[in-house]
Image (cartoon, rainbow, N blue to C red):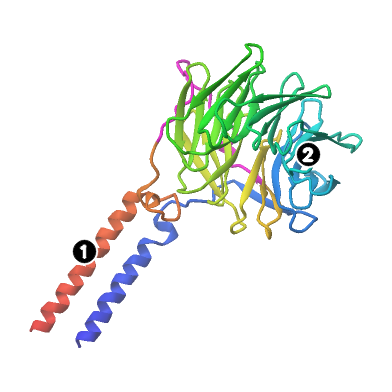
Amino acid sequence: MRARLVMRACLISAAIVLVLHLPGASASDGGVAGATMEGYPLPTPFSHPLGIVSDGEGRIWFTEQSTHRIGLFDPEKEEFTEFDLPAGASPADITAAPDGTIWFTLVSSAVNSIGRISPASGKTETFKVPTPAAEPYKIAVAPDGAVWFTERNANKIGRFKEGKFEEYAVITPDSQPNGISVDSNGVVWFAESVGNKIGKLDLAAGSMTEYLIQHPFVNPADLIVDSDDRVWFVEMNGNKIGMLDPATGEFNEATIPKVSSVPVALAVGADGLIWFVENRGNKVGSFDPRSATFREYDIPTPRSLPSGIAVDPRGRVWLTESDRDANSILMLVPAVEETTLEEPPAEDTGPAMVDTPPPAEEAKGGEGGGGGGSGKAAAAIVVFVLFAAALWYIIRRTQK
């Protein structure tokens, strides 16, 4: 009799737990109504795609690090083209210049170069960086056509224009400069992954300045400047999107809902949304600076290790799935309401960023980011009370 009562109490408690954790009981952490995703497997297996960019015509260019190629995907024809690079080149980042030329970095110590492709002719050229084993990593093109890149191993910022290189040593030793971008005034901004700073190189003023990020060891990685010349970056260890306002020198940060997501790359849409990939969270995220709100999209491929992200002229978001088996590029067509931001009120003075901690259940390392910690905490209390009541009932019955 006692065993039967215990079994009944356990079954009732288990049923309560199951009901409280059904998908319908809390908001989803992934699928967004109206959004679609489509993957395109690369023609060469195990190519390890990393950097990605959209050119002015909406074609998608990306690096294939393991197979030492540059890939091109035409979304209209759904056709791939691949361009061979020197043996062992190991391409990493890629960008498109205003004139349509495609520039990329080759991080291999032996090759140690930046390269370019002319889309019209398909001709590929490489240019060896002066400092040996500099490990050129991220790359950007300035409004004047100068090509800027970070030398992660040499702790320098490189510039290439009209066939000539110039290099500028970063102030902080061993800072490992990573992401780089150029604002509308030609000022170069870069992230120092180990230095935990944002750097500024102003050739017109002949100066380099560093801004110390307010939290230590956040590991700033990719960096980009928006149309208002605000500097955005991802914090790989901090699990945040950061922004430096050059006008004030002040930082703002916003915590990504998915805990331990490891954001590694970001892009800015024409509508002002900040897009990023969560390398370990296996999601694509967007941040609206005006409302300080996030939206996250689950990637269908398990553990795809998204690494690069770009937004094309039509507002579609593209990313690389660098996992050995995923080996694809993925297109996200966002929800309609997300592609257009409302105009800010007249008194608006900038992004309304806030540093809000993640939901309680995620702070403990739980999966998902939708329902919030308070709902699950309440559910746990309910289960505990009901289970205690069941045990009390059993004890009372057995004492009779």
Give the quarter of the image for residue 159: top right
Mark 1: give few (<14), some (14-19) or many (20+) Cα within 10 Å.
few
Task: Farthest residue to the left: give it.
Answer: 400
Q: Which numbered circle lies on residue 70?
A: none
Task: Farthest residue to the right: give it.
Answer: 121
Q: Which numbered circle lies on residue 385?
A: 1
Residue range corresponding to the magenta coloring: 331-355
As for residue 126 lying within the magenta part, the answer is no
Q: Where is 95 relative to 171, above or below?
A: below
- Measured in 3D between alpha carbons, the distance from the residue under mark 1 to the one under mark 2, in whole angstroms, is 59 Å
Q: Where is 34 relative to 2, above or below?
A: above
Amino acid type, label 1: Val
Mark 2: give few (<14), some (14-19) or many (20+) Cα within 10 Å.
some
Q: Where is 385 relative to 100, above or below?
A: below
Closer to us: 256 or 140: 140
Residue 282, horizontal then vertical, whole percent: 56, 52
Q: Is residue 255 left or right of residue 139?
A: left
Closer to us: 291 or 93: 93
Residue 398, horizontal then vertical, whole percent: 12, 83
Does any portion of residue 268 appear in the rendered image? no
Q: Where is 159 relative to 128, above or below?
A: above
For the C terminus, which image quadrant? bottom left
Q: Is residue 292 left or right of residue 49?
A: left
Give the quarter of the image for residue 286: top right
Amino acid type, label 2: Arg
Q: Which numbered circle lies on residue 59?
A: 2
Task: Farthest residue to the bottom: give it.
Answer: 1
Residue found at x 23% / y 85%: 3
Q: Is residue 393 left or right of residue 375?
A: left
